[in-house]
Image (cartoon, grey):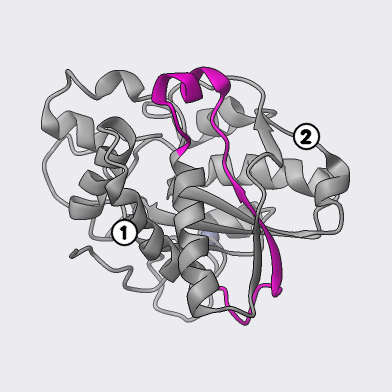
Amino acid sequence: MEVPVLSGPACPRCGDNVDTPEQDSLCRACRLAPPPFERAVAYAFYQDTLRSAIHALKYDRMHPAAKRLGRMLAQAIVQLHGEAPTNLLVVPIPLHRTRYTERGFNQARLLAAHALQALHASHPAWKLHLAPAALMRLRATESQANLTPHARRVNVRGAFSVNDPAAVKGRHILLIDDILTTGATARAAAVTLKRAGAATVWVATLARARRAHPGAPIGPTNAHNSSSAPSDTQDGAASQAPTASVDSSINQPSS
Ligand SMILES: [Zn+2]
């Protein structure tokens, strides 16, 4: 499967593409408000083939794609090898139960399970334990698709809760999701885990959206393409799948 690779200078913290060619310089968002997670990694940009594959997984229930996508997620997680602790609790971003009922599965959990299977084989000494029930989604958040970055943060604020604080206290957590856009969802989940006593939180997603930076090249260039600002992981969307045109449906992701 050919997917675009992440290229160009990136923020060492959140992985966002940055304009400055200097190594290790944080992006503006991380300078202004350091994220509650240590580092976020992704396999590739959310565009083209990968976007179609994630869309097929979520809305067309193409579960066979999950194994292949899980191996890609494993490659993203490998970037943390040697940097993140060797004992990690792997927590997929949960769906709210209404969305879960609609979709029938949580794609983040499915991807995490396949990624761990690959990593247990390739990195047997790395202790990665899947903890799908560690985090709970308290409310069905509004679609993030048409929200500004600020509104996205407000939208997911207080959206998560930790089921059993004793299970995360002092633990190092690896949060998993399919797409990272502004990072609002990852930040909200990480804050919740840290408040419950988690020692550190790391983030790995299959894809990340390119943010629109002045002068930075942005994926495909059709005028109403929203690849530079799709909804932040979760939310929205289920409604768009069957009836929307191919273009608009793949350009308005979210989980
Ligand atoms: Zn950053």
Q: Is residue 182 visible?
A: no
**Number of numbered discs overlaid on the protein picture:** 2
Q: Which residues are magenta?
A: 80-106
Whichever of labels 1 and 2 marks the residue nearer the N terminus, that label is: 1
The amino acid sitting under disc 1 is Arg
Cα distance in 3D space between marks 1 and 2: 31 Å
List x then y, in percent, for residue 76: 45, 67
Q: Pointer 2: what residue?
A: 163
**What's the residue at 45%, 57% (across, down)?**
114
List x then y, in percent, for residue 72: 36, 64
Q: Is residue 101 magenta?
A: yes
The amino acid sitting under disc 2 is Asn
**What's the residue at 74%, 40% (across, down)?**
192
List x then y, in percent, for residue 248: 18, 30
In the image, taking residue 169 as reference, residue 153 lies left or right, namely left
Element type where label 2 sits in the image: loop
